C-alpha cells in the first residue's frame, strides 16, 4: 500500500488548529460509514485510548410539549395536556468514556470501581468477582495489569472448559486493544481467569509470531501465574469458607489440569486441591487437613476412585482401610485418576490407591502379612481353585484375604491396571472417535478377585464345592454371582445383564422350592403328632 501527502485546497477550511484525514472507501467497505459499525470498532479496540474519540451520529431524544389539539377546549385554570414527541439531532458523541483504571495506583481505586470495571469490560453485569489483583511490572519490561477470578463459571466455558473463542486475558499495547486470544499469555489451566495486561514494550502491530519469540511474553506469563495463585490462596484463607467452596465447585477441574500439565507450578497447586473423604461428611478436605488428622505412625495417604461418593462408600477396597480407622479420600471424576498420577507424594507421605493389588499397612510386618496370605490360600485351596476355573477369562487370579470386614469379595486392579471409572472413560473416548469398545482393554485390565473366606457366603460356596460334583450348576451360579456382586460394589459394570438376572431368578426359585419343601415337611410332621387328652376328674 502507498499514500501521498499534498496541500488541501478544495475542502472546507478547518476552524482553529488541527488536521483533517479523509478516507476513501471501496464499494465493498461501505459498512464502515455506518455509525454503529464505527462504535463497535472503537469500543473494541480504542475503549481506553487516552485522547478523546467522538463519532458524528444521529440521535433521537424524546421531550414533552403541549398537545395543541387536546388543549383546544381547555377551560381556564386547567393544566395543559402534554404529549411526547421525538426530536432528532446530529452531533459528535464521545465513545471512549471508560477510564483505564489499571493506570491508576491501586490505593486510589475503590472496590466498587474494580467491580464496575470488571462488569463493564467483560460484559458480566450479574457476576461479582471473587478476587482481584492490581499490579505493575518494572525493570526489564514495563506493563500494568488487573486480574479477576469470576464469581461464576463464564457461560462460554460451561460447555467447553477450554473454548478457543472464550476471551480471558485482554492484551493492550499503550492502551490500544490488540487481542484476547493469545494462548501463551497464561497456561490453559488458568483459562477462567479474566483480566487486562497493558504493555509499554510491545509494538502496536504485535502478532502471535512476534509474541512467541519475545522474552516479554515469558516474563508476563510467569507473573500472571504467580498473581493468579496468590488470588486463589487469598480466597482459600478467607474467613468465609463458602467462598472457596464456590470457587472449587466452579473452577476445581482447572486446578486438576494444572497439576497434570504445569510441572513448574504443580507444588503450588496441590495444596489447593479438595476432596471428599470417608471422614469429611458432606464437606471437602485438603491433603493438609488429611495429614493433620492421620493416625500415629501412619505413613501413607489412602484414596479410592469411583463414579461418585455413594459408590466410593460402597467400595469393598475402601472398606479394607476404613475398618482399620484410616481416612480414605474419594476421587470421583475420571480427571482425578489422571491427576493423581502426578501426585505420588505429599509432604513425604506416599499416596496409595486402595483398589490396587498388594495393599500394605504401616502397622503390619510385610513378612507376616505374606505368610498369613499364603496360609489362607492353602487353607482354602479348594474354593480358590474352583473360583479360578469358574471365572476363567473374567479375572486374572483369585486370592484369599482377611482384610475385608463386611464384604464377601472385592475386585482390585494390578499395580498398572486402570480403575473401572477410567476404563469406562477410555471406552467412551474410543467410541466417540469412531472405534469400538469391544475388547479394547484386552486381558491387561482383568482384575484380581480378593475373597473373604470368613464370610458366610464364601463358607456356603466352599461347602458346595466340597459336597457337590464339579459340574454342579448351583455351585457355578453361586461363584459367578459372587463375582458379579464384587464387580458391582467395586465399580465395574455387569457384562451380561441378562445372564445376571437369570442367575438371580435361579437362586430365588431354588430358595422358594426349599421353603415350600420345608413347609410341607413341617405340616406333615404336625399331622402325625398324637393328640393328648387332658381330662379332669370331677
Image: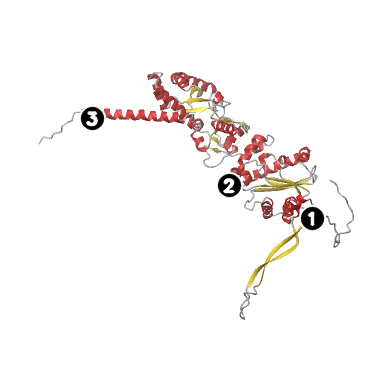
Q: Nearer the viewer, mark 1 or mark 2?
A: 1
How many C-alpha atoms fall within 10 Å of the one at disc 2: few (<14), some, or many (≥20)? few
The mark closer to the camera, 3 or 1, is: 1
Q: Nearer the viewer, residue 12 or 221?
A: 12
Res 77 quadrant in image? bottom right
Residue 266 can be seen, yes or no: yes
User: Dot 3 lies on which element?
Assistant: helix
Residue 519 % position (x, y) = 28, 30
At 49% from the left edge and 25% from the top edge, which residue is drawn? 450
Compared with 419, 252 (above or below) is below
Q: Identify the secondary structure beneath mark 2.
A: helix
Q: Nearer the viewer, residue 191 or 457?
A: 191
Nearest to N terminus: mark 2 or mark 3: 2
Indicate the quadrant containing the C terminus: top left, top right, bottom left or bottom right: top left
- Of helix, strand and loop, which one carries label 1? loop
User: CA separation, marks 3 and 1?
Assistant: 108 Å
* Residue holding disc 3: 526
- Residue on which the image places disc 1: 51
Q: Quadrant of residue 269?
A: top right
Marks 1 and 2 in Cβ contact (< 8 Å):
no
Residue with the mark numbered 2: 242
Left or right, 104 with reference to 453: right
Q: Residue at horizontal 60%, vertical 38%?
A: 288
Above or below — where is 25 with respect to 394? below
Depth check: give the residue in front, 258 or 31: 31
Q: Is residue 427 left or right of residue 41?
A: left
Amino acid at each position: 500500500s502507498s499514500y501521498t501527502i499534498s496541500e488541501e485546497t478544495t475542502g472546507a477550511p478547518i476552524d482553529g488548529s488541527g488536521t483533517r484525514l479523509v478516507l476513501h472507501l471501496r464499494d465493498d467497505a461501505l459498512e464502515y460509514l455506518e455509525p454503529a459499525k464505527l462504535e463497535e470498532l472503537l469500543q473494541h479496540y480504542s475503549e481506553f485510548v487516552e485522547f478523546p474519540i467522538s463519532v458524528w451520529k444521529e440521535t433521537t431524544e424524546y421531550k414533552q410539549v403541549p398537545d395543541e389539539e387536546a388543549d383546544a377546549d381547555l377551560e381556564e385554570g386547567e393544566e395543559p395536556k402534554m404529549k411526547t414527541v421525538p426530536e432528532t439531532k446530529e452531533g459528535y458523541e464521545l465513545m471512549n468514556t471508560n477510564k483505564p483504571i489499571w493506570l491508576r495506583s491501586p490505593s486510589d481505586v475503590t472496590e466498587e470501581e474494580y467491580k464496575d470495571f470488571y462488569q463493564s469490560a467483560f460484559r458480566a453485569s450479574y457476576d461479582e468477582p471473587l478476587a482481584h489483583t492490581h499490579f505493575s511490572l518494572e525493570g526489564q519490561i514495563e506493563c500494568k495489569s488487573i486480574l479477576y477470578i469470576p464469581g461464576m463459571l463464564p457461560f462460554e466455558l460451561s460447555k467447553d472448559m477450554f473454548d478457543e473463542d472464550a476471551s480471558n486475558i485482554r492484551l493492550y499495547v499503550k492502551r490500544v486493544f490488540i487481542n484476547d486470544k493469545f494462548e501463551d499469555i497464561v497456561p490453559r489451566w488458568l483459562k477462567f481467569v479474566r483480566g487486562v495486561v497493558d504493555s509499554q514494550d510491545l509494538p502496536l502491530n504485535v502478532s502471535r509470531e512476534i509474541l512467541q519469540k519475545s522474552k516479554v511474553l515469558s516474563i508476563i506469563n510467569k507473573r500472571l501465574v504467580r498473581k493468579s495463585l496468590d488470588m486463589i490462596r487469598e480466597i482459600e484463607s478467607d474467613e468465609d469458607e463458602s467462598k472457596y467452596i464456590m470457587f472449587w465447585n466452579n473452577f476445581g477441574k482447572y486446578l486438576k489440569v494444572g497439576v497434570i500439565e504445569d510441572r513448574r507450578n504443580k507444588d503450588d497447586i496441590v495444596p489447593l486441591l479438595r476432596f471428599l473423604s470417608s471422614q469429611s461428611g458432606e464437606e471437602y478436605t485438603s491433603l493438609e487437613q488429611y495429614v493433620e488428622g492421620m493416625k500415629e505412625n501412619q505413613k501413607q495417604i489412602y484414596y479410592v476412585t469411583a463414579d461418585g461418593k455413594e459408590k466410593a462408600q460402597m467400595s469393598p477396597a475402601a472398606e479394607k482401610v476404613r475398618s482399620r480407622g484410616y481416612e480414605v479420600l474419594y476421587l470421583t471424576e475420571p480427571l482425578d485418576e489422571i491427576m493423581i498420577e502426578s501426585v505420588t507424594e505429599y509432604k513425604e507421605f506416599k499416596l496409595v490407591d486402595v483398589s490396587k493389588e498388594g495393599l500394605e499397612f504401616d502397622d503390619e510386618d510385610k513378612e507376616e502379612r505374606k505368610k498369613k496370605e499364603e496360609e489362607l490360600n492353602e487353607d482354602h485351596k479348594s474354593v480358590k481353585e474352583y473360583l479360578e476355573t469358574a471365572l476363567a477369562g473374567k479375572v486374572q487370579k483369585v486370592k484369599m484375604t482377611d482384610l475385608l470386614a463386611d464384604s464377601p469379595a472385592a475386585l482390585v486392579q494390578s499395580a498398572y491396571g486402570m480403575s473401572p471409572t477410567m476404563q469406562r472413560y477410555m471406552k467412551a473416548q474410543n467410541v466417540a472417535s469412531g472405534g469400538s469398545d469391544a475388547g479394547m482393554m484386552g486381558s491387561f485390565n482383568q482384575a484380581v478377585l480378593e475373597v473373604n473366606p470368613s464370610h458366610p457366603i464364601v463358607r456356603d460356596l466352599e461347602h458346595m464345592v466340597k459336597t457337590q460334583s464339579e459340574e454342579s450348576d448351583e455351585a457355578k451360579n453361586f461363584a459367578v454371582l459372587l463375582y458379579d456382586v464384587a464387580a458391582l460394589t467395586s465399580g465395574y459394570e455387569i457384562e451380561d445383564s441378562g445372564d445376571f438376572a437369570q442367575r438371580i431368578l435361579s437362586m430365588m426359585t431354588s430358595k422358594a422350592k426349599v421353603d415350600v419343601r420345608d413347609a410341607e415337611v413341617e405340616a406333615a410332621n404336625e399331622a402325625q403328632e398324637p393328640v393328648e387328652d387332658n381330662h379332669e376328674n370331677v
